[in-house]
Amino acid sequence: MSDVQQRPALPRKTAEIAFALLLAVVGGTVIAGSRELETGWGGSGPEAGYFPLRIGIVLVVASLAVLVREALRPAGAGVLIVGPAGGRLALFILPLAALIGAAPWIGVYLAAFAYLLVAVGLVGRVPWGRALAIAIGTPLVLFVAFEYAFRAPLPKGPLGPLLGML
């Protein structure tokens, strides 16, 4: 292997700590949200916030366990991503992060179209005709499924009314 392939792009300890912190934030958010509801046991069983509170606590405790384990682990103990794999992973994660960030503003369907076009066409190097068909077809199937079959509309953003998606 060459030096480029051996060079760590993401040490395992860094990834574990970052994920543990993210898990703690998610757990804390679940706990905070459940505290807006009754979290005890009522006359007919558990209240609405009973299980979410406990799930949030489990998430926070698990994240603390990972943080303690990583604090005790030696610094050079393993690599999660090596060399060029980090760049390939970034090519997958960055468009996904853009999808998540753009969806509230432009709607899920348009964000999914843009994500699929980039992920399938550019990153996946699928021929543009097929990539365009996937990028158009998938949000269309999602629209029909969620709007009509499930009757659970997804956010459409400000473009929804312009496109007749009320």
Image (spheres, grey):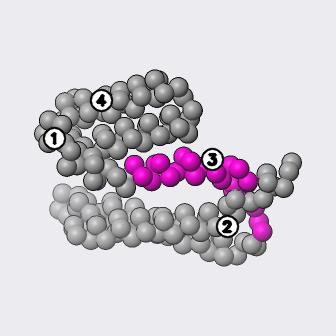
Alpha carbons under labels 4 and 1: distance apart: 16 Å
- The residue carrying mark 4 is 140
Residue at x 28%, y 66% (from the top left corner): 34
Image coordinates of residue 29 in percent, x first then y, are 35, 67
Residue 152 lies left or right of residue 7; in this view the side is left
Q: Earlier in the sequence, mark 2 or mark 4?
A: 2
Magenta residues, as a range? 76-99
Q: Amino acid at mark 4?
A: Leu
Residue at x 40%, y 61% (from the top left corner): 55
Alpha carbons under labels 2 and 1: distance apart: 48 Å
Alpha carbons under labels 2 and 4: distance apart: 41 Å
> Of discs 1 and 3, which sits in the foreground?
1
Q: Amino acid at mark 1?
A: Leu
- Report the number of numbered marks: 4
Residues tagged 2 and 4 counted as in contact (Cβ below 8 A) = no
Q: Which label sits on residue 88?
A: 3
Residue 152 lies left or right of residue 26; in this view the side is left
Residues tagged 3 and 2 counted as in contact (Cβ below 8 A) = no
Image coordinates of residue 28 in percent, x first then y, are 39, 70
Q: Is residue 139 above or below residue 102?
A: above
Q: Earlier in the sequence, mark 4 or mark 1?
A: 4
Q: Is residue 155 visible?
A: no
Type of secondary structure dominating the magenta stretch:
helix
- The residue carrying mark 2 is 13
Residue at x 68%, y 49% (from the top left corner): 85
> Of discs 2 and 1, which sits in the foreground?
1
Under circle 2, the secondary element is: helix
Q: Amino acid at mark 2?
A: Lys
Q: Earlier in the sequence, mark 3 or mark 4?
A: 3
Q: Amino acid at mark 3?
A: Arg
Under circle 4, the secondary element is: helix
> Of discs 4 and 1, which sits in the foreground?
1
